[in-house]
Image (cartoon, rainbow, N blue to C red):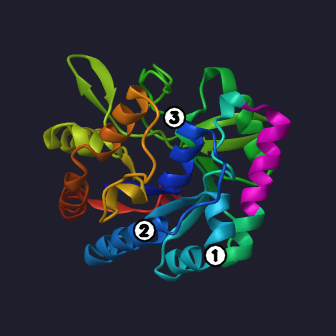
Amino acid sequence: MRHGISVDLEDWFSLVRRRIWGIDGPPTDRVIAATTVLLDLLDRTSTKATFFVLGRVAETYPDLVREVKGRGHEIGTHGHAHERVDRSGPEAFAEDLRRSTVAIEAACGVRPAGHRAPEFSISRETTWAYGVLAAEGLRYDSSVFPASAGRYGIAGAPVAPYTVDAGGGRTLRELPLATVRIAGRRFPAAGGGYLRILPYLLIDAAVRQAGAAGRPAVLYVHPYEFDPRPLTFDEPLPSLRARAFVAAQNAFRGRAAPRLERLLRTYEFGPLEGLT
C-alpha cells in the first residue's frame, strides 16, 4: 500500500505576523531554509511528495518552487493569500484560486491538479468550494479531516478517497487526511502538529490502520517544522494568548524530522495525485 505525503508550502512568519499584529506582509526568506531541510530529508529517503504551494510564496520566491519541481515533487495549490474558505465566498475563493494558479504556473510551468484549503477549511457549510475547484480545472482536493477537530473536520465523512459531486456534471476526488481509530472514535493524526505532539505510536497506528483497510493514509507537514532556527520574533508578543500560540508552535519541533524520516523509511509514501 502506498500512502500520501504532502507539504503545505507557506511561510510561518508572514502568516503569524498577520494573525498576531494584523500586518499583511510578504513571505520571508526563512521559508527557503526550512523547505531546503525538508527537501533534503525527502531526498535521503527517496520520497516524492505533493507540495501545496501558497501563491504568495510562488510570487516572492519562484526559484524555490522551481527547486521543488526540479527535485521531482508534485506541485499543487494552497490558494494565494491563505484565507480560510469559510471566511470567503464563491467569487472571492475563485479569484484567490486563480491568482495562486497564475503565480505557480509562472514560477515553475505547472498548472496544479490538486488543492488544499488553508487550515483544512472545507466543511459541510463550504461544500460549494468543490464547484469552484472543478470549474477552475482542479482534479482533486485534500482538505477534509473525517473527524471532529474543533476548527475543522467533517465527522462521519469517508476515510478513504471518494468522489464529490461538484455540480454542473463535474466531479472531484477528495483525499481525506489520516485519522486514528481509538475506542470506536476517530481522531486526527495526519502530521503537522499531530506529528510533533502526539505519541509516535498513534501516528504509526493511523498509517497501519489505513493500510490494513486497503486505503492510503494522507499525511502533511509544513516547512517551518523543519526550520533549523527557533520560531521567534524580534518584537515582544502582545498578549499571553500570542505567547502561548508561538510556544505551542515551537513545542517538540525537534521531533518532526526524525519522526517523519522514520515513517518514510517504514512505509511507502508518494505524491497524492497517484492516490486519486
**Which amino acid type corresponds to the residue marked 1 in the rendered image?**
Pro
Nearest to the observer: residue 149 or residue 20? 20
Nearest to the observer: residue 265 or residue 27? 27
Segment tinted magenta in the rendering: 88-101
Nearest to the observer: residue 181 or residue 39? 39
Q: Where residue 275 sits in the image (x, y, percent)?
A: 47, 54
Which comes sooner in the sequence, label 2 or label 1?
2
Q: Nearer the viewer, mark 1 or mark 3?
A: 1
Q: Where residue 223 sits in the image (x, y, percent)?
A: 41, 60
Q: Are marks 3 and 2 in contact (CB under 8 Å)?
A: no
The 10 Å Cα crowd at callout 2, few under 14, some 14 to 19, many 20 or more, is many
**Could you tell whether 132 is left or right of 3 in the image?**
right
Q: Where residue 1 sits in the image (x, y, percent)?
A: 31, 55
The question of residue 89 being in magenta is answered with: yes
> Which residue bears the numbered disc 1?
62
Q: Nearer the viewer, mark 3 or mark 2?
A: 2
Label 1 vs label 3: CA separation? 28 Å
The 10 Å Cα crowd at callout 3, few under 14, some 14 to 19, many 20 or more, is many
Image position of 169 with respect to 28: above or below: above
> Which residue bears the numbered disc 3?
144
> Which residue bears the numbered disc 2?
35
Q: Secondary structure at mark 2?
A: helix
Query: What is the tally of numbered marks visible in this picture?
Result: 3
Task: Tell me what residue is drawn at x 41 percent, y 72 percent.
Answer: 33
**Could you tell whether 89 is left or right of 37 in the image?**
right
Task: Tell me what residue is drawn at x 57 percent, y 73 percent.
Answer: 65
**Could you tell whether 201 is left or right of 242 in the image?**
left
Q: Secondary structure at mark 3?
A: loop
**Which amino acid type corresponds to the residue marked 2 in the rendered image?**
Thr
